[in-house]
Image: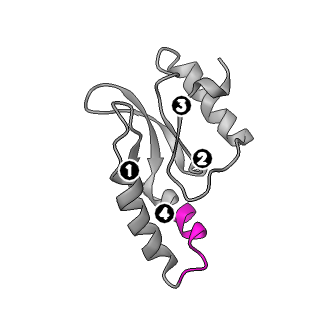
Amino acid sequence: MSISKVKRIPYTLAIMKLSKHNQKIVDFIEAGYSDYSDKILLTDGFDDAFIGVGENAQGNPVAVYSIEKCLDILAEQFKDEEDAMGDAIDYFEFNVRGSYVGEFTPMFINTLSL
């Protein structure tokens, strides 16, 4: 399966080009979830926040992202603003966490840094 068959949804301010890291994500999904690899949705620009695949309330496998890492990525996008992290949180809550794109909508979780 080619990378283009894994669906991607844009969440960030800037769509980023596919990277080697991204190919690792696609390979991971195709190897472990081959029956769903064309249904699992990935977000553009949040590759560094991807932490794995989980199961939603309907039992569907979904991409899982770290909220903290997503906010760091968005804060970098807003770095020229007066309150970059505040703007990142607002953007994330409204445009990312608040979005529903179907039964395979990605999951965003709080993570603990040790």
Q: In this view, does 45 lie above or below 80?
A: above
Give the tally of numbered discs. Answer: 4
Q: What residue type is labelled 2?
A: Asp
The answer to the question of whether label 4 and label 2 lie on touching residues, with beta carbons closer than 8 A, is no
The answer to the question of whether label 4 and label 3 lie on touching residues, with beta carbons closer than 8 A, is no
Please tell me whether mark 2 sits on a helix, a strand or a loop: helix
The residue that appears at 74% across and 39% down in the rendered structure is 20
Magenta-drawn stretch contains 50: no
In the picture, the disc for residue 47 is 2
According to the image, label 1 marks what residue?
A: 109
Q: Residue pushed farthest bottom?
A: 82
In the image, taking residue 32 as reference, residue 101 lies left or right, namely left
Q: Name the residue nearer the viewer: 21 or 8.
A: 8
According to the image, label 3 marks what residue?
A: 7
- Give the mark toward the camera: 3 or 2: 3
- Give the mark toward the camera: 4 or 1: 4
Q: Callout 1 environment at 10 Å: few (<14), some (14 to 19), or many (20+)? A: few
Disc on the earlier residue, 3 or 2 = 3
Q: What residue type is labelled 3?
A: Lys
According to the image, label 4 marks what residue?
A: 71
Q: Residue pushed farthest top?
A: 35
The residue that appears at 41% across and 53% down in the rendered structure is 96
